[in-house]
Amino acid sequence: MLSLLAQQTEPLCVCDITAQFDQHQPTISHHLRLLREARFVDCEKRGVWAYYWVTDAGQRALIVALSLG
């Protein structure tokens, strides 16, 4: 999920993120909340949807994870 968000140039809506995974929206939202609590992603509410993007800390964590293989 973090990798998906890191590839985007614009924030992604939860509905768009959910479409990329074989999970239901509440499960995706739960994982996004955990990533937000870890400060790896941030979000902005727009109407009924939340839009997510990767933070600098999330980018660094992803680089470290990918370098470890």
Image (cartoon, rainbow, N blue to C red):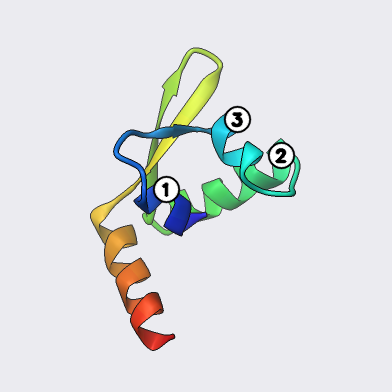
How packed mark 2 is, by other alpha carbons closer than 10 Å (few <14, some 14-19, many 20 or more), is few
Which comes before the other along the chain, label 2 or label 3?
3
* Contact, mark 2 vs mark 1 (Cβ under 8 Å): no
Helix, strand or loop at label 1? It is helix
Q: Nearer the viewer, residue 29 or 23?
A: 23
Residue with the mark numbered 1? 5
Where is residue 52 shown, x and y percent of the image?
42, 38
Residue with the mark numbered 2? 26
Relative height, residue 19 to residue 68 (above, below): above
The CA distance from mark 3 to mark 1 is: 13 Å
Relative side of 54 to 26, left or right = left
Q: Residue at x 42, y 59 (%)?
A: 38
Q: Residue at x 44, y 58 (%)?
A: 3
Q: Amino acid at mark 1?
A: Leu
In the rendered image, the residue lying farthest to the bottom is 68
The CA distance from mark 2 to mark 3 is: 11 Å
Q: Amino acid at mark 2?
A: Pro
* Contact, mark 2 vs mark 3 (Cβ under 8 Å): no
Q: Nearer the viewer, residue 23 or 32?
A: 23
Residue with the mark numbered 3? 15
Relative side of 69 to 49, left or right = left
Relative height, residue 53 to residue 51 (above, below): below
* Contact, mark 3 vs mark 1 (Cβ under 8 Å): no
Nearer to us of marks 2 and 1 is 1
Where is residue 6 shown, x and y percent of the image?
36, 52
Where is residue 23 shown, x and y percent of the image?
74, 47
Where is residue 49 shown, x and y percent of the image?
53, 22
Helix, strand or loop at label 2? It is helix
